Image (tube, grey):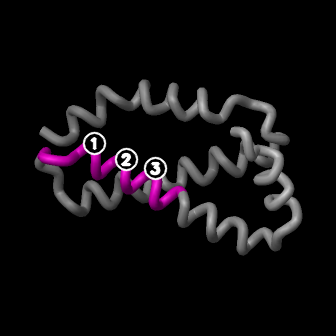
Amino acid sequence: MENKWAIYHIYNSLSRDVFERYLMDACQYIVSAYLKTEFAGKSIDLQDLDALIRLHKCACFGSVIDWLNGGMKDDIVGYFRRVCTLQKGWLENLGR
């Protein structure tokens, strides 16, 4: 959050396709790391894990783009913490 305005400046100055490609890569990395940690040691089909990673990668990307388009006014960190809290129960039930 301390670099929020630098990110917003980059978002508005780079070609949009370059920015979006790197943002999608960052979302892929973050979501993959989170879900692989969440399901470590649990039995989950690799195709199911890949589907969950893709779903959450796209949701993450869309949320960040929406936040940027809204002028970065909302607390995006608080938003993602709340989403993770809401999803905690059903994610734990998937890996059984």
| Real-space Cα separation, disc 1 to disc 2, in angstroms | 6 Å
Asked if residue 22 lies left or right of residue 3, the reply is left
Amino acid marked by disc 1: Glu
The disc at residue 56 is: 3
Amino acid marked by disc 2: Tyr
Q: Nearer the viewer, residue 54 or 21?
A: 21
Reply yes or no: does residue 13 show up in magenta: no
Return the residue at label 1: 38
Dot 3: element: helix
Q: How many C-alpha atoms fall within 10 Å of the one at disc 2: few (<14), some, or many (≥20)? A: few
Q: Nearer the viewer, mark 3 or mark 1?
A: 1
State the image quarter where residue 15 is shown: bottom right
Asked if residue 78 lies left or right of residue 95, the reply is right
Q: Nearer the viewer, mark 3 or mark 2?
A: 2
Q: Residue placed at 54% from the left, 66% from the top?
A: 25
Asked if residue 38 lies left or right of residue 28, the reply is left
Query: Do labels 1 and 2 touch, CB within 8 Å?
Result: yes
Q: Residue placed at 18% from the left, 42% from the top?
A: 95
